[in-house]
Each structure stands twice: as C-alpha cells, then as structure tokens.
Image: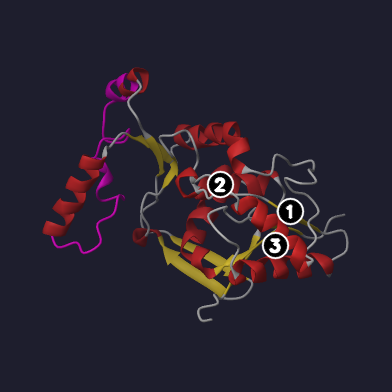
Amino acid sequence: MTELITRFAPSPTGNLHIGSVRTALINFILKSKNNNSKLYLRIEDTDQKRFVKGAEDYLIESLKWCGIEIDESIINGGKFGPYKQSERKEIYKPYAEQLVNDGFAYYAFDNSDDLTLMREKMKAAGVPSPQYNAITRNTMQNSLALSQDEVDKKLKSGTPYVIRIKMPRNEEIKINDIIRGWVVVNTNNLDDKVIFKSDGMPTYHLANVVDDHLMEITHVIRGEEWLPSAPLHVLLYRFFEWDCPQFAHLPLILKP
C-alpha cells in the first residue's frame, strides 16, 4: 500500500528559483525514503495573466538536471492526469457550485467600482485594511444580500460573477503543521476569498484542494508563503467532507 503521496506544484510564471528547487528536493527525498511512495509534478497555471512562455519547459529541464525523478507528470502521464490545471478546467466548477448549494460559498456580482467604493467607505470608517468579509458582504452585490429573484435574473442575463467562500464567524481553525506544530487562526481575521473567477477558472485555493484530493495526496510540502492560506484550505476540506493531508510549510530562502 502506498505510504506517502506528495507533489511538486509550481506555476509557470518565470524561471525556477532556488527555493522551489529545495521544495522539490525535499518532496523527492521524502518519497525516496518511503516504500511504495510517489511524487507527482502538477503545473498550476490557473493565473493565465502571469503565464510566461517557455517557463514550463525550463522547469521540467531544471528538475531533470537536478536529478529529481517524478513518478507522474505532464511528461510521463499517469492515472490522475491531466497534470496541468488549465487542462482540468471543466473539473472545478461543479465543486464550486456544490459549495454554493451547501451554503459554504456564494455568487458575488460586484464590479471594480463596487469594490473600490466599499474599501473607501471602510477606510473612512477607520478600518485600516478593508476586506470583503462577514461584516461587509451584506452591503454588496452578492447572492447573500440580494433576493433570489435578483440573483436568478443576474445569472440568466450573463452578469459576470465570481464565487466567494463564505467564511464562518469567530471560529478557530487549527492546523498541526509537521514543521511548525499547531497553528491556530480565527476566522474573523480571514476574508471571503474568491475561489472561482469570472473567466471560468478556479483560483489557486479551490484548484489546489480539489486536485490534491483527487490525486490522493497525503502530504503537502510547500513554502511558508502559503501558510496564511492553509486555514482556508483546511476549511475547504471540511466543507467537502474530505480527509485533509498533512501540511509542512518550509521556511523561505531570503538572501543570496
């Protein structure tokens, strides 16, 4: 039986930097030290605006040069493919819709002017870092604040929308990180993140969780820049009633 399934999941937004190489190396070492374990390479290219032509090929060649062997990827395939998120686009929307139907997410029709106005009002009220959250959501153009008739009309007319997570009020999210131990975050400090964009693509948060579940990932090993997002990811696992993988957030390399 497979003991450990992990993945290296970079974005093709530029050259592979040394921190990412170290993350890939640690994933590879852990896989190598555990019998029947696997390491997958997944290209996370949901943010098409930051896509850099040639970055994907450079990334693959860099891993080969480093001697990091991948069990399944866009190169050698595997049972959980495709291994590029832009090619998995049709997978994600049903999961986003499921969250809406279950009351864990909602449609938001706000345009850029609506969002700017909200932030300006909050700053004028003395809020230093305005957020789209449980305090502001009921004043915005979304399916929680609008009537069902209004929501249906907007959906039928093709009004652009995103899907936002409905962050619970005043709950403590606990994460037992392999490196950092227990990390506790109160949901009052978290905003209603967008999980599905108006262009039909998921954000990193939804795609990452869905793919890790479908690919049966047991250990998520990544840089600590993703630690602030971990509470949202834990919540998504809970909302979907899925088993959560173990997390390990690696310290960053900050200097040359």
Residue in the foreground of this view, choosing between 134 and 90: 90
Residue at 37% across, 49% down: 192
Query: What separation in Å lies between label 1 and label 2 (alpha carbons)?
Result: 16 Å
- Answer above or below: position of 146 versus 37: above
Q: Look at label 1 and name its amino acid.
A: Tyr
- Answer above or below: position of 22 versus 108: below
Query: Where's residue 47, x and y in %?
Result: 49, 46
Which residues fall within the magenta stretch? Answer: 125-153
- Answer above or below: position of 149 versus 59: above
Residue in the foreground of this view, choosing between 124 and 147: 124
Q: Which residue is mark 3?
A: 62
Query: What separation in Å lies between label 3 and label 1 (alpha carbons)?
Result: 15 Å
Q: Nearer the viewer, mark 3 or mark 2?
A: 3
Of labels 1 and 2, earlier in sequence is: 1
Secondary element at image label 3: helix
Q: Nearer the viewer, mark 1 or mark 2?
A: 2
Q: Which residue is mark 1?
A: 40
On the question of residue 205 being in view, the answer is: yes
Query: Where's residue 115, x and y in %?
Result: 24, 45
**Residue most extreme to the left:** 124
Horizontally, residue 153 falls left or right of residue 16, namely: left
* Circles 1, 2 touching at the beta carbon (< 8 Å): no
Q: Which residue is mark 2?
A: 45
Q: Nearer the viewer, mark 3 or mark 1?
A: 3
* Circles 3, 2 touching at the beta carbon (< 8 Å): no
**Magenta-colored stretch includes residue 7:** no
